[in-house]
Amino acid sequence: MATPTASDRDRPAGPIVVIGAGIGGLCAALPLAHAGYDVTVLDRHGHVGGKMRQVNGVDAGPTVLTMRDVFDDLFAVAGTRLEAHVTLFRQDILARHWWPDGGTLDLCADRAVNAEAIGKLSGPHDARAFAAFCKQAETLFDGFRDPVMHNPRPAFSGLAAQVLRAPRLLRAMAPMRSLAGLLDHSFSDPRLRQLFGRYATYVGGSPYRSPALLALIWQAEAAGVWCVECGMQALPRAIATLIQARGGRIRLNAQVENILTDGHGIAGVTLADGAVLSARHVIFNGDPRALAKGLLGREVASVAPQTVRLPRSLSANVWAFAARPTGPELAHHNVFFCADPRAEFDAIARGRLPADPTLYLCAEDRGKPQSPPGAERFEIIANAPPLTRHRQTAEETDRCHRQTFRTLARFGLHFDPSPAAGTLTTPEMFEALFPASAGSLYGQSPHGMTAALARPVAETAIPGLVLAGGGVHPGAGVPMAALSGRHAAAAILAGRTSPSPSRPTAMPGGTSTGSVQTESAPSR
């Protein structure tokens, strides 16, 4: 991945506009601002972070921070250290898992401790199976990290060459199996199949239709999970502050209506208030489907056509609230499993809300040196179909709300006060927050063996237009979105996306962009 050099700083360049202050856009803007480029980040919302958002000071987006090295590298490129800007706490417990039959299982970063716990829950066969599964996940993660995750333009030929160099990688991929099929072959306890199958949902998929290679997600989590002081949004706020310290600008509540081109490539953007900002490069950090559907103008509607044609990933119903809990002892990350995972994912595939969904619960104030007394902050996530499959009715939303807290009550967990329906973000609300997403939180569906190669990449056919975000290669999730931003920045730093050098770098009627401080989310 390209690292800014002295020659980068000396290179003349026109303005760069980043549309979207999500983690991908911010991770693109920081190395560019540090390298001396004229960078302005625009976002239609009143906060940075994109999906990494808060509602009344409670996280209402991603909650799991893995692959910390991605962010260590990002801050190092900017000449500083991650821990100088964000306080992180490594979690002793990766997640606490609960089943309707009364079974529970804590998983941690220590493979031997996990094997012992699995042996107690499921017997010695599955303890041995877990050890083999860990080796398989590690092989997949190591095999795909460089040729796919860190490669801005992965190709099937590159993967084939990697497999030829390491034949065990093909065996680990189990190309004829789904993730669920792999787990059926590995574990005898259906609870363990359900647990490790859930990792498909990290990228918006069903374990019954996602490829077995998604087992590598377990390795990413097993290598370490961190929580962030003041919530996950503290991370994008820290990056945004650093962008400003390096001379970049952050403009919030700035809606982009159109991306403009001329005969040479990108020319600028038009804002909702009529202002025109000139730009030599535009990094689009939104759902690329918005471009293909013409939401940013016909001039760029040829970009990412596959996002309209291919199926979408999962959506979710998400609650964010503060309350006093009573009941079982919670970890920071908790999963309350349903009784029949096949029925859950079959319902979603049919475009219906599951009658009995698995519930993920983040107890935001747990897993830190000191938990504050009184009310705690919670986020609950239940998977749902995207709007391309089903539009959730008001009656279904009300039933989903009641069912969720009845399910937790069956596990003995109660909240005071009981969360109101207004604490819920539905798929329809996500579509409004993130236009053209169809409520999908992870971009294109990960189903199918070649899904990882079907996402749009950073570079487009329009000179000066670059893509970043969870809907772009290498995919969904906080570290993957961050890597997409690094790929976008690297393309500009390497000069691979530049329009003709003979074109003008300013547009008649262009306006300057004054610095606007990022807003701090409410805190408890």
Image (cartoon, rainbow, N blue to C red):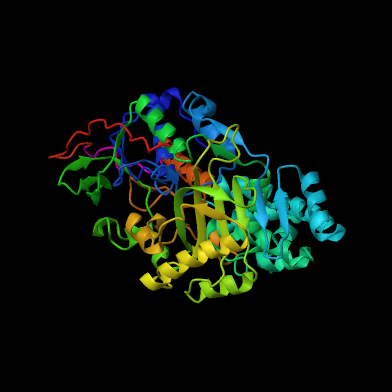
Give the x, y percent position of residue 54: 41, 45
Q: Does the magenta stretch include residue 439?
A: no
Locate residue 223: give its quadrant.
top right
Most distant residue in the left direction: 509
Q: Residue at x 21, y 40 (%)?
A: 277
Q: Where is residue 316 in the image (x, y as percent from the top left)?
A: 47, 61
Please tell me whether residue 440 is drawn above or below residue 75 in the rendered image. below
Residue 39 vertical position relative to residue 324 in the rendered view, above or below: above
Residue 393 visible in image: no
Nearer-the-camera pick, 43 or 432: 432
Q: How many marks?
A: 0
- Left/right placement of residue 311 relative to residue 410 reads left
- Find residue 209 and report its horizontal and vertical position in percent: 60, 69
Does 276 appear above or below 206? above
Taking depth in this image into account, of 493 and 33 the one nearest to the observer is 33
Could you tell whether 89 is left or right of 486 in the image?
Answer: right
Tell me if 285 is positioned left or right of 156 in this view.
Answer: left
The stretch in magenta equals 496-504
| Left or right of 340 on screen, residue 301 | left
Task: Tell me the chief SS of the magenta region.
Answer: loop
The image quarter in which residue 42 lies:
top left
Picture residue at 50% right of the left edge, 33% below the top: 74
User: Which corner quadrant holds the C terminus?
Assistant: top left
Decide which of 196, 227 is in the foreground and name it.
Answer: 227
Q: Where is residue 295 in the image (x, y as percent from the top left)?
A: 27, 59
Queried whether the magenta region covers residue 499, the answer comes back as yes
| Residue 209 appears in the figure | yes
Of all residues, the one furthest to the bottom in this rendering is 350
Q: Which residue lies furthest to the right in this view?
A: 124
